[in-house]
Image (cartoon, helix red, strand yellow):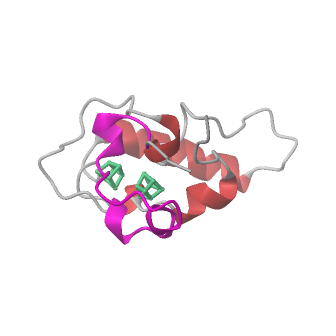
Amino acid sequence: MVGIDFSMENIKKCLCNKCAVQIESQCVRDKQKIMLLITQQDLDSPMRMDEERVPGLYCSTGMASCKDIDPKKVCKCNECSIWDQYKLVAQRYFCQNGSANISQ
Ligand code: SF4
Ligand code: SF4
């Protein structure tokens, strides 16, 4: 099955970090702090970016592991370049609904 790559390039494009749905989540903030530490470290660091550590790119990885997010707020996916690139059209709220369905 074709999916959206879980890559550093796509993590950088993802707008989930700026999304109101998760901006007040303590769990997400904690993950963001760890991500910042990882990006500041050398490539040979034992701490690596993995799906569990990244609070975003849910269109690739599926539902959020943080449970203190607020899906009543507005999703930003439709402003994202990956959303355009993969023509995700009616699909949003991947943190709630799971990863994107891609028809190719
Ligand atoms: S998937 Fe959508 S609703 Fe969820 S955090 Fe990302 S931008 Fe916000
Ligand atoms: S479509 Fe949504 S979940 Fe996927 S990269 Fe963009 S903002 Fe993140």
Taking the magenta stretch, the answer to whether it contains residue 93 is yes
**Drawn side of residue 85 relative to residue 101, left or right:** right
Q: Quadrant of residue 90?
A: bottom left
- Horizontal arrangement in the rendering, residue 40 relative to residue 4 (left or right): right
**Residue farthest front in this picture:** 104
Task: Give the image location of residue 18, x and y in percent.
Answer: 36, 62
Q: Is residue 73 above or below residue 85?
A: above
Residue in the foreground of this view, choosing between 54 and 9: 9
Q: Give the quadrant of the N terminus.
A: top right
Task: Return the residue nearer the eye: 45 or 57.
Answer: 57
Residue 45 percent across, percent down from the top left = 81, 39
In the rendered view, tell whether residue 96 sits above or below residue 73. Answer: above
Q: Position of residue 13 (x, y in %)?
A: 54, 65
Relative horizontal placement of residue 63, taking residue 90 as reference (left or right): right
Residue occupying the point 38% across, 32% down: 63
**Which residue is rendered at x = 67% and y = 54% of the image?**
8
Looking at the rendering, the stretch of residues picked out in magenta corresponds to: 77-100
Mark count = 0
Residue that sits furthest to the right in the current view: 44
Magenta span contains residue 83: yes
